[in-house]
Each structure stands twice: as structure tokens, then as C-alpha cells.
């Protein structure tokens, strides 16, 4: 078996971003919450995305993608809100058409733009301010197109890959 060096990238608090842009394996992560008692969910996704727009009415957010999203009801996806105040994170979807689905968000009324990452590699839930260390067994999780990390406003993550 070939030895692969493990590398890391730090994703700053509330700044979702690309960890690595080519085929690699997600090996683990350290996730920290800057606000104790505030639950958050971090998602590590395969770096393939679909752009779209959204409209939120109360807690139902309707997302329309520019191309077919290929999702099924109940699947979880990483949604990065690139405008507005809805929180970035993983959501369960309810599919209404090949280019439209809904998710449940905190109560708001707004519209804007989103980027959807349909393939989540791993999710980490964190509530308190003690960092959580996640070690993936074996060779790690294959990310065919690289790793994108979606973090909410109060979360930072150091991602290990290789």
C-alpha cells in the first residue's frame, strides 16, 4: 500500500470554503464552537455544486437550481447561502421538481442566491465550546472532486485530508 501524507486546512469561524480541489480522502477534522450551548452542524461535501436562487416564506425556503439537481426527498445536502441571513449548513430536502426543492430554515422572509453541494461526505454536530476531534477509520472517505467545508457563523474547522 502506498503511503499518503496527511495535510490540513483551517476554515475560519463562519467562513465556508474549499479545503482541497482535487481527488483526495477526508481523514478527519477538529471542529470548534465559539458559542457554548449553541448547536451547530458542520458539513464536509464533495466539491461539486449547483448554483441557484431561493425564496423564504416563514420557515419554508424554496430553492430553484440552474440545472437538474438529481436529488430525492429526504436526502441531505449542504446549502451555502451566498446572500441573505439564512444559515449555511446541511438540510434535508423535499423535492418538488427536477430543479426545485424546499428546506426548513429559521423564520425569515427573504430572497437571494445559494450554492448547493449535493453529496455530503460527513457531518459533525457540536453544541458546547469544547473542540470535537473526528477521526475517520481506515483510508478515509473518498472525495472525487475535492472537499468543501460548510460552517455556520459560530464554527471553525481544521480539516485533515490526503
Image (cartoon, grey):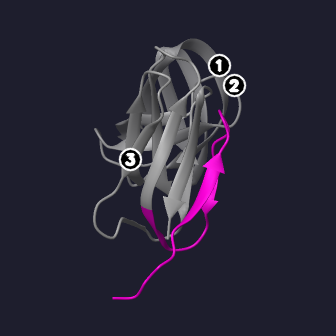
* Local SS, label 2: loop
Is the residue marked by circle 3 packed among few (<14), some (14-19), or many (20+) residues within 10 Å?
A: some
* Image point (46%, 14%), residue name: 37
Which residue does the numbered mark 1 point to in the structure image? 110
Q: Is residue 66 visible?
A: no
Left or right for 83, reference 30? right
Q: Earlier in the sequence, mark 1 or mark 3?
A: 1
The correct choice, above or below, for 7 with respect to 129 in the image is below
Left or right for 15, reference 77? right
Q: Earlier in the sequence, mark 1 or mark 2?
A: 2
Which residue does the numbered mark 3 point to in the structure image? 134
* Local SS, label 3: strand
Left or right for 100, reference 10? left
- Give the x, y percent position of residue 103: 43, 29
21 part of magenta stretch: yes
Q: CA distance from mark 2 to mark 3?
A: 31 Å
Q: Which mark is residue 30?
A: none
Which residue does the numbered mark 2 point to in the structure image? 84
* Image point (33%, 70%), residue name: 139
* Image point (36%, 41%), residue name: 76
The correct choice, above or below, for 94 with respect to 11 in the image is above
The correct choice, above or below, for 26 with respect to 155 in the image is below
Is the residue marked by circle 2 packed among few (<14), some (14-19), or many (20+) residues within 10 Å?
A: some
2 part of magenta stretch: yes
Left or right for 53, reference 102? right
Q: Is residue 129 visible?
A: yes
The total number of labels drawn is 3
Task: Please give the range of residues in magenta.
Answer: 1-26
Quick check: marks 1 and 2 in contact, CB under 8 Å?
A: yes
Amino acid at each position: 500500500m502506498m503511503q499518503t501524507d496527511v495535510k490540513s486546512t483551517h476554515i475560519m469561524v463562519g467562513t465556508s470554503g474549499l479545503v482541497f480541489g482535487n481527488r483526495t480522502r477526508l481523514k478527519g477534522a477538529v471542529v470548534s464552537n465559539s458559542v457554548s450551548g449553541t448547536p451547530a452542524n458542520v458539513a464536509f461535501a464533495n466539491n461539486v455544486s449547483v448554483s441557484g436562487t431561493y425564496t423564504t416564506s416563514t420557515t419554508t425556503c424554496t430553492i430553484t437550481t440552474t440545472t437538474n439537481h438529481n436529488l430525492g426527498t429526504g436526502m441531505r445536502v449542504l446549502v451555502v447561502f451566498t446572500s441573505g441571513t439564512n444559515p449555511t449548513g446541511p438540510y434535508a430536502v423535499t423535492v418538488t421538481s427536477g430543479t426545485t426543492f424546499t428546506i426548513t430554515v429559521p423564520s425569515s422572509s427573504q430572497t437571494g442566491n445559494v450554492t448547493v453541494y449535493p453529496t455530503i461526505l460527513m457531518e459533525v454536530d457540536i453544541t458546547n465550546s469544547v473542540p470535537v476531534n473526528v477521526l475517520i477509520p481506515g483510508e478515509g472517505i473518498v472525495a472525487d472532486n475535492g472537499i468543501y467545508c460548510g460552517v455556520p457563523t459560530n464554527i471553525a474547522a481544521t480539516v485533515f485530508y490526503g
